[in-house]
Amino acid sequence: MAYDPENIFAKILRDEIPCDKIYEDEHALAFRDINPQTPTHILIIPKGAYVSSDDFTANASEAELAGFLRAVGQVARDAGLVEAGYRFLANHGQDAHQEVAHFHIHIFGGKNLGRMIKPVDK
Ligand code: AMP
């Protein structure tokens, strides 16, 4: 899938639409999810144009990979989630219901999140 520069997170990166920004560095931007699923629900996106986790893990440079993952940890620490715990995940593609085609990691926290995902029909 080709990267669409008109996706909503690309517009946020270009400051064309606002976000509730909580962290930014050379490799990553973090902001609050507009439709939070948990008391703390943060999205972290790389600054580079990557469609999803598949694209990012295949094509990002070592510096982007390392910088981005470091940012995920920093955001969770800054949000005060380390002691109680948190979960992060990334959706790739149709079966995972990825909605926005710019790679992003969700950080969920602020409550007991239960065990992993809900069982679904196989
Ligand atoms: P995903 O299904 O993993 O692609 O998740 C996309 C997420 O982006 C959803 O949780 C949406 O609520 C969130 N989202 C969509 N538009 C915005 C926006 N403008 N600002 C913040 N979060 C957004």
Image: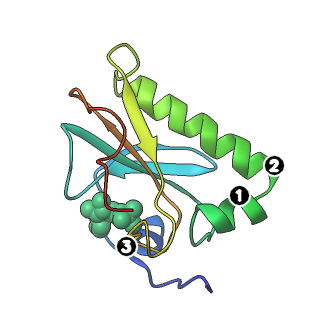
Ligand 1 contact, mark 3 (Cβ < 8 Å): yes
Mark 1 element type: helix
Label 2 CB sits under 8 Å from any ligand 1 atom:
no
Where disc 2 sits, the SS reads helix
Between 48 and 60, the residue placed more toward the observer is: 60
Q: Is residue 18 visible?
A: no
* Ligand 1 within 8 Å of the CB at mark 1: no
Q: Residues within 10 Å of mark 1 (few under 14, many from 20)?
A: some
Q: Secondary structure at mark 3?
A: loop
**Residue 106 falls left or right of residue 114:** right
Q: Earlier in the sequence, mark 2 or mark 3?
A: 2
Distance of label 1 from label 3 (alpha carbons): 19 Å
Residue 2, percent from left and from top? 62, 86
Please provide percent x and percent y for residue 36: 20, 50
Along the line of sight, the residue nearer the viewer: 86 or 15 = 86
Q: Residue at x 43, y 79 (%)?
A: 7
Check residue 99 in the rendering and tell me which mark sits there, or answer none: 3
- Residue drawn at (67%, 62%), measured in percent from left and top? 56
Q: Mark 1: which amino acid? A: Thr
